[in-house]
C-alpha cells in the first residue's frame, strides 16, 4: 500500500511531463511560415464565395508580403505570429483543413456567416490559446466535439482560456458533452438553432463565469438542472423552443443579475418559483406556451419594475392578472393571453382592465389579453397608450363602447376585440389612420359602415361579421385596393354590390353572406385574380351567376402561384364532386397530374388550391388564334397524358378512372409539360373490380358508347375519350363540330380522310386513335400499349425530321 501511494504521483508526473513535451509543446517548433501554409491550405479548401478576392490577397507571390497583411489576419506585435483570423460575412463555402490547427498562436477565430461545412476536426484542439470561437451561421455538422476539454491526462492542453464559444445556427447534432463544464473561463456559450438532443448536463453549473447562455431552438429534453442556480453571473438565459420538461428549479431565484429569461415553447410544468419574482434586474421574461400553473403574486409589478417584455401567454396560470403590472411603466409588450385567469374572487375589481393601464403610456406597444377572462368596459385611459401598435382583447366579456379617447391611438395598426359584448358605432374609429387589421366580429356594433373607412389606405384585413350593421356599403370603400380580407357576414347590410368591387385588386377573401344584399352579383368579381373565397350565400342576389366554377389564380405566402378552383355550391352535385376530387387528388403523385396544394372548405364554400399551370389548357392552344403547337409538341403532350392515364389505370393502388378526358382538362405548365386535371367525376374502382356503374355524365362527344347508354365505366372509357382527343389534337376539329351533324362524326371523318390527305407519321397516330375508339370496349387497346405506340411514333417522327433537315 505504502509503496503504491508513493509510486502513483511520481508516475503521473512523469507521464504529464512526457505529454507536455510531445503534445502541447510540439507547437513551439512552428513558425510564421507554418501560419502561411495553414492559411493557404484554408484558401485551397474554399470552393466558392469571395475566394477570388482571397486568392489575390492571400498570396505568397508578392515578395514583401507577409501573412500579417492579409485580409482578415492579425498578428501579435512581438512574435509576429497569427493571433486573429476573421473571415466572417464573406459568403465562403468550403471546409476547414486540419492545417488550421497549426495556427498555434491563434486567440480569436471568427468564421461567422459563411457556408463552411463538415465536422470540426480534432486538429483544432491544438489551438490551446483560443479565447474566442465564433462559428455561428455556417453549415457545420456532427457532434459538438469533446476535444475542447479532452480527458484528464491531456488536461494541460484543454481550452482553459476559452471565453466565447459560439456554434449557433449550424447543424450540429447529438448531446451537449458534459465536459463542457471544464471550460471554466467561459463567459458566453451559444448553441442555439442546431439539432441538439439529450439533456442539459449538470456540469454546466461549473461554468461560474458564464454571463450568456443560449440553447434555444434545439430538441433538448429533460429538466433544467438545479445547478443552473450556480451561474450567478448570468445576465441572459435562453432555453426557448426545446422539449424541456419538469419544473423551473427554484435555484434560478439565485440568478440575481439575470436580465433576460426565455423559457417559452417548452413543456415546463408546476408554478413559477417565487424566487423568479425577486430577480429585480429582469427586463424580459418569456414563459409562453408551457404548462405552467399557479398564480402570479399581486405585487409582481413592484418587484420587477424594470420589465419591458412580459410574455406569459398560453399556460395554465390562474388567479387574477396582477393590476400592479401597470407599475412596470417601461413595458413594451404585455401578453397574458390564454390562461385560466379568473374574474372571480373577493375583490369586485378583479378581472377589470385597470384604469391605471394609462401609466404605460410612455412605452406600451403591444397589449394582448385575448381569452383572459377580463370583463367590464374598456377604460378611457387606454386612449393614453399613444404608442400602442397592437391591442388584442378578443374573446372576453367586455361591454360598453369604444372610448372616445381612442382617437389618440394614432399608431394603432391591429385592433382585435372580436367576441365580446361591445356596442358602439364605427365612426369612433375614423381617426385611426394607421389601422391595418381590424377585427370587431361577434359583438353588437351597429349603425352603418362610415365613409371614412375608404380613407384607411393601410387596411388589409377588415372583419366586421356578426354584428348589427345596416344600410349600404359606402362608395369610398371600394378605393381600398390593398384590402386582402373582407368579412361582413351576418349583418343587416343591404342595397346592391356595385361593379367597383372589381377595384379590390388584392383581395383574396370576400364574405358578405347572411345579409340583405340584392341586385346582380357584380360580374367584376370574376376579374379578381387573387380571390380564393367568395361567399354570397343567403342574400337576395339575382341575375346570372358569374363563372365561379372557373379557376382563379392565387399567390401563396411563399410566393408560389396556385390555381384556385372554386366550386359553386348552388349547383347540384358540387359537394360530391369536390369531395371526390379532393380524395382522388390528395393521394395521387405523378409528374403529369395536377398537384393539390391546399384544400379549403366550410359549410358554404369549397375551394381547391392546385398547382398553377401558366400556359393554360390544351383546348386554348388548339383553338385560339394566337396559339400554335407544332407536331412534336402535340406528340409530347399526348405522351404526357397517356403516361398520366396509364398511372391512374395501372400503377396506382386502386385503379382510378378519370371519366372526363378532354383538351380543356389537360393543362400545360411553363415548360409545356401536360398535366391532367379535373377529377370531379373520377371513379375509384375497388380492388378486383374492373368496371362500375354511374349516373354522372361526362362530356358529350368524348364519352364511350357503353358509358353514355348504360353508365358502365371502366378503364376502356378513358381509352375511348383519349382516342377522340388524339384525333382532335391532330385534326383541330372538335368531336361535336357542326360539320359532324348527321351520320358524319369525327371518327368517320378521320377514317374517310385516310390515307391520302395525311402524312405517314400522322396516319400511324390516327391508326392508333381508331384502335382506341372501337365501338366494343374489349377491342380497344390498353393505355400501356397506347403509350408505347406513341413513343415509337415519336422516335419515327424525330428520325423523319432528321432526314429532312
Ligand atoms: C491585402 O489587402 C490588404 C487590405 O486591403 C492590403 O493592405 C494588402 O496590401 C493586401 N495584400 C496583398 C498581397 O494584396
Ligand atoms: C470580424 O469582422 C466583422 C466585420 O466583418 C466584425 O463585425 C466582427 O466583430 C469581427 N470579429 C471579431 C472577433 O473581431
Ligand atoms: C452575411 O454575409 C452576407 C455576405 O455573404 C452579407 O450580405 C450579410 O449581410 C451577412 N449577414 C449578416 C447578419 O452580417
Ligand atoms: C500542419 O498541419 C498539417 C495537418 O494537420 C500537417 O500535415 C503538417 O505537417 C503541419 N505542420 C506544418 C509545419 O505545416
Ligand atoms: C447547408 O446545407 C444544406 C444541405 O446541404 C443546403 O441546402 C443549405 O443551403 C446550406 N446552407 C448554407 C447557409 O450554406
Ligand atoms: C435532426 O435530428 C434528427 C434525429 O435526431 C434527424 O432526423 C433530422 O433530420 C435532423 N435535422 C436536421 C436539420 O439535421
Ligand atoms: C422551434 O424550432 C423549430 C426548429 O427546431 C422550428 O421549426 C419552430 O418553428 C420553432 N417554433 C417556435 C414557436 O419558434
Ligand atoms: C452548484 O449547485 C449545487 C446545487 O444547487 C450545489 O449543491 C453546489 O454546491 C453548487 N456548486 C458550487 C461550486 O457552487
Ligand atoms: C425574495 O426577496 C424577499 C425580500 O428580499 C425575501 O424575503 C424572500 O425570501 C425572497 N424569496 C425567495 C423565494 O427567494
Ligand atoms: C390620460 O390622458 C388624460 C387626457 O386624455 C389625462 O387627463 C390623464 O392624466 C392621463 N392619465 C395618465 C395616467 O396618463
Ligand atoms: C350600448 O348599450 C348601453 C347599455 O345597454 C346603451 O346605454 C348605449 O346607448 C348603447 N350604445 C349604442 C351605441 O348602442
Ligand atoms: C377622406 O380624406 C379626404 C382627403 O384626405 C378628406 O377630404 C375627407 O374628408 C376624408 N373623408 C372622411 C370621411 O374622413
Image (tube, rainbow, N blue to C red):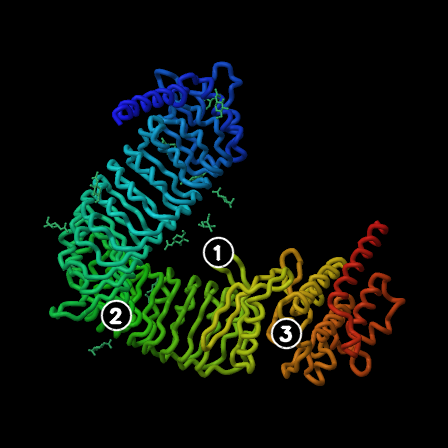
Label 3 or label 2, whichever comes before in sequence order: 2
Which quarter of the rendering shows the N terminus? top left
- The Cα atoms of the two marked residues, 1 and 3, are separated by 39 Å
Please state which of residues 672 and 183 is positioned toward the viewer in this rendering: 183
Q: Residues within 10 Å of mark 1 (few under 14, many from 20)?
A: few
Q: Which residue is mark 1?
A: 558
Residues marked 1 and 3 touching at CB (< 8 Å):
no
Label 1 or label 3, whichever comes before in sequence order: 1
Please state which of residues 215 and 304 is positioned toward the viewer in this rendering: 215
Q: Residue at x 55, y 65 (%)?
A: 596
Q: Give x and y (percent) for residue 112.
A: 41, 36
Taking the image as four quarters, which one is ligand 12 found in? bottom left
Establish if 119 lies above or below 603. Answer: above
Q: Residue at x 82, y 63 (%)?
A: 762
Dot 3: element: loop
Q: Give x and y (percent) for residue 509.
A: 45, 68
Dot 1: element: loop
Q: Residues within 10 Å of mark 2 (few under 14, many from 20)?
A: many
Dot 2: element: loop
Q: Which residue is mark 3?
A: 687
Asked whether the viewer can see residue 1, the reply is: yes
Q: Please tell me whether mark 3 or mark 2 is closer to you in this view.
A: 3
Residues marked 3 and 2 touching at CB (< 8 Å):
no
- The Cα atoms of the two marked residues, 3 and 2, are separated by 53 Å
Q: Residues within 10 Å of mark 3 (few under 14, many from 20)?
A: few
For label 2, being within 8 Å of ligand 11 is answered no
Amino acid at each position: 500500500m505504502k509503496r503504491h501511494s508513493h509510486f502513483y504521483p511520481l508516475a503521473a508526473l512523469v507521464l504529464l511531463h512526457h505529454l507536455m513535451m510531445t503534445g502541447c509543446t510540439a507547437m513551439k517548433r512552428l513558425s510564421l511560415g507554418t501560419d502561411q501554409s495553414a492559411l493557404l491550405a484554408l484558401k485551397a479548401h474554399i470552393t466558392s464565395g469571395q475566394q477570388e478576392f482571397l486568392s489575390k490577397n492571400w498570396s505568397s507571390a508578392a515578395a514583401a508580403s507577409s501573412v500579417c497583411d492579409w485580409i482578415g489576419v492579425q498578428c501579435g506585435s512581438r512574435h509576429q505570429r497569427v493571433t486573429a483570423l476573421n473571415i466572417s460575412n464573406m459568403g465562403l463555402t468550403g471546409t476547414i483543413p486540419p492545417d488550421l490547427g497549426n495556427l498555434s498562436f491563434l486567440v480569436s477565430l471568427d468564421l461567422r456567416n459563411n457556408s463552411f461545412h463538415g465536422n470540426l476536426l480534432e486538429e483544432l484542439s491544438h489551438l490551446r490559446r483560443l479565447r474566442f470561437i465564433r462559428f455561428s451561421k455556417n453549415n457545420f455538422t456532427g457532434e459538438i466535439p469533446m476535444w475542447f476539454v479532452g480527458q484528464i491526462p491531456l488536461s494541460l492542453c484543454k481550452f482553459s482560456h476559452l471565453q466565447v464559444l459560439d456554434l449557433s445556427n449550424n447543424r450540429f447534432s447529438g448531446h451537449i458533452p458534459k465536459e463542457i463544464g471544464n471550460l471554466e473561463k467561459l463567459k458566453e456559450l451559444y448553441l442555439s438553432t442546431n439539432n441538439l438532443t439529450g439533456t442539459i448536463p449538470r456540469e454546466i453549473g461549473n461554468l461560474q463565469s458564464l454571463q450568456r447562455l443560449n440553447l434555444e431552438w434545439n430538441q433538448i429534453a429533460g429538466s433544467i438542472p438545479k445547478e443552473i442556480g450556480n451561474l450567478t453571473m448570468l445576465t441572459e438565459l435562453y432555453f426557448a423552443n426545446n422539449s424541456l420538461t419538469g419544473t423551473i428549479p427554484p435555484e434560478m431565484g439565485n440568478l440575481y443579475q439575470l436580465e433576460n429569461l426565455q423559457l417559452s415553447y417548452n413543456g415546463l410544468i408546476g408554478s413559477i418559483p417565487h424566487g423568479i419574482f425577486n430577480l429585480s434586474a429582469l427586463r424580459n421574461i418569456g414563459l409562453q406556451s408551457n404548462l405552467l400553473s399557479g398564480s402570479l403574486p399581486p405585487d409582481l409589478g413592484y418587484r420587477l419594475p424594470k420589465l419591458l417584455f412580459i410574455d406569459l401567454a398560453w399556460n395554465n396560470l390562474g388567479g387574477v392578472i396582477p393590476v400592479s403590472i401597470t407599475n412596470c411603466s417601461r413595458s413594451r409588450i404585455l401578453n397574458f393571453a390564454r390562461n385560466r385567469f379568473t374574474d372571480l374572487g373577493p375583490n369586485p375589481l378583479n378581472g377589470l382592465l385597470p384604469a391605471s393601464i394609462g401609466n404605460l403610456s410612455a412605452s406600451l406597444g403591444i397589449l394582448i389579453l385575448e381569452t383572459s377572462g377580463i370583463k367590464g368596459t374598456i377604460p378611457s385611459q387606454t386612449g393614453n397608450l399613444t404608442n400602442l401598435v397592437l391591442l388584442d382583447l378578443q374573446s372576453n366579456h367586455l361591454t360598453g363602447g369604444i372610448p372616445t379617447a381612442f382617437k389618440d391611438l394614432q399608431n394603432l395598426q391591429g385592433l382585435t376585440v372580436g367576441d365580446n359584448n361591445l356596442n358602439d358605432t364605427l365612426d369612433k374609429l375614423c381617426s385611426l389612420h394607421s389601422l391595418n387589421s381590424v377585427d370587431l366580429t361577434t359583438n353588437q356594433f351597429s349603425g352603418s359602415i362610415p365613409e371614412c373607412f375608404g380613407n384607411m389606405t393601410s387596411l388589409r384585413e377588415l372583419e366586421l361579421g356578426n354584428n348589427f350593421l345596416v344600410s349600404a356599403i359606402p362608395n369610398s370603400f371600394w378605393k381600398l385596393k390593398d384590402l386582402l380580407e373582407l368579412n361582413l357576414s351576418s349583418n343587416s347590410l343591404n342595397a346592391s354590390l356595385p361593379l367597383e368591387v372589381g377595384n379590390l385588386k388584392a383581395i383574396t377573401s370576400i364574405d358578405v353572406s347572411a345579409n340583405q344584399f340584392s341586385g346582380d352579383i357584380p360580374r367584376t368579381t370574376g376579374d379578381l385574380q387573387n380571390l380564393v373565397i367568395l361567399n354570397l350565400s343567403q342574400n337576395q342576389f339575382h341575375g346570372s351567376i358569374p363563372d365561379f366554377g372557373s379557376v382563379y389564380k392565387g399567390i401563396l405566402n411563399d410566393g408560389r402561384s396556385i390555381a384556385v378552383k372554386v366550386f359553386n355550391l348552388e349547383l347540384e352535385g358540387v359537394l360530391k364532386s369536390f369531395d371526390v376530387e379532393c380524395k382522388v387528388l390528395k393521394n395521387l403523385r405523378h409528374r403529369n397530374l395536377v398537384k393539390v396544394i391546399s384544400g379549403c372548405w366550410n359549410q358554404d364554400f369549397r375551394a381547391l388550391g392546385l398547382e398553377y399551370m401558366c400556359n393554360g389548357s390544351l383546348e386554348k392552344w388548339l383553338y385560339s388564334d394566337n396559339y400554335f403547337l407544332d407536331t412534336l409538341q402535340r406528340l409530347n403532350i399526348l405522351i404526357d397524358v397517356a403516361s398520366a392515364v396509364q398511372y391512374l389505370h395501372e400503377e396506382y393502388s386502386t385503379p382510378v378512372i378519370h371519366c372526363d378526358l378532354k383538351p380543356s382538362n389537360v393543362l400545360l405548365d411553363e415548360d409545356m409539360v401536360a398535366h391532367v386535371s379535373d377529377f370531379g367525376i373520377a371513379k375509384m374502382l375497388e380492388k378486383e373490380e374492373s368496371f362500375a356503374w354511374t349516373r354522372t355524365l361526362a362530356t358529350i362527344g368524348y364519352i364511350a358508347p357503353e358509358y353514355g347508354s348504360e353508365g358502365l365505366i371502366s378503364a376502356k372509357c378513358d381509352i375511348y375519350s383519349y382516342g377522340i382527343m388524339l384525333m382532335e389534337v391532330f385534326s383541330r376539329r372538335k368531336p361535336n363540330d357542326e360539320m359532324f351533324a348527321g351520320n358524319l362524326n369525327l371518327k368517320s371523318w378521320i377514317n374517310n380522310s385516310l390515307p391520302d390527305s395525311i402524312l405517314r407519321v400522322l396516319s400511324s397516330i390516327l391508326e392508333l386513335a381508331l384502335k382506341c375508339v372501337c365501338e366494343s370496349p374489349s377491342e380497344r387497346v390498353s393505355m400501356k400499349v397506347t403509350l408505347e405506340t406513341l413513343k415509337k411514333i415519336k422516335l419515327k417522327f424525330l428520325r423523319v425530321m432528321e432526314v429532312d433537315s
